[in-house]
Image: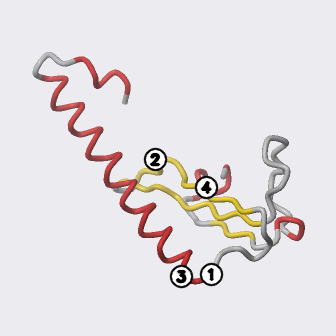
Amino acid sequence: MGYVTHTGQARIALDIGQDAVFFNNPDLPQTHSEMALPLIGGKKILGALDVQSSQEAAFSEEDIIILRVLADQLSIAIENARLFARKSGRSGNHSSRFW
């Protein structure tokens, strides 16, 4: 995920054993496939959507398309929440401090 949040580029590893960039997470030892997609709002990287599977080659082209759409929708929702919090903060609501 660090690569994705640094570059804004998606990373898909269908076999993490063959992926030189993969970080072996001790909390998820059964991971064999991983897809990390950037969450981008405007020109800013907001974070990443990370999906992992215990199966090798777990992601199809259709999965990738669907998860890219989901990542785009999450980015929009995050940006909308931030804008709402900023606007609400002007009216005396201090919830914007969490964004």
Residue lying farthest bottom? 61
* Left or right relative to 42: residue 32: right
x and y percent of residue 96 in the render?
29, 25
**Along the polypeptide, which appears first: circle 3 or circle 2?**
2
Q: What residue do we see at 39% from left, 54% from top?
A: 74
Tell me if mark 1 has few (under 14), some (14-19) or many (20+) residues whose alpha carbon lies within 10 angstroms of its own.
few
Q: Which residue in the protein does label 3 denote?
A: 62
Gap in Å between the C-alphas at discs 4 and 3? 16 Å
In the displayed structure, 82 sits above or below 60; it is above
Q: Are marks 3 and 2 in contact (CB under 8 Å)?
A: no
x and y percent of residue 83 in the render?
23, 40
Tell me if mark 2 has few (under 14), some (14-19) or many (20+) residues whose alpha carbon lies within 10 angstroms of its own.
some
x and y percent of residue 32 in the render?
81, 64
Tell me if mark 3 has few (under 14), some (14-19) or many (20+) residues whose alpha carbon lies within 10 angstroms of its own.
few
Q: Which residue in the protein does label 4 denote?
A: 50
Kindly identify the amino acid type of the residue bearing the numbered disc 3.
Glu
Q: Are marks 1 and 3 in contact (CB under 8 Å)?
A: yes
Which is more toward the observer, 38 or 73? 73
Specify the label residue 46 is tagged with: 2
Foreground tag (2 vs 4) = 4
Q: Secondary structure at mark 2?
A: strand
Q: What residue do we see at 75% from left, 77% from top?
A: 57
Q: Which residue in the protein does label 1 denote?
A: 60
Q: Secondary structure at mark 1?
A: loop
Gap in Å between the C-alphas at discs 1 and 4? 15 Å
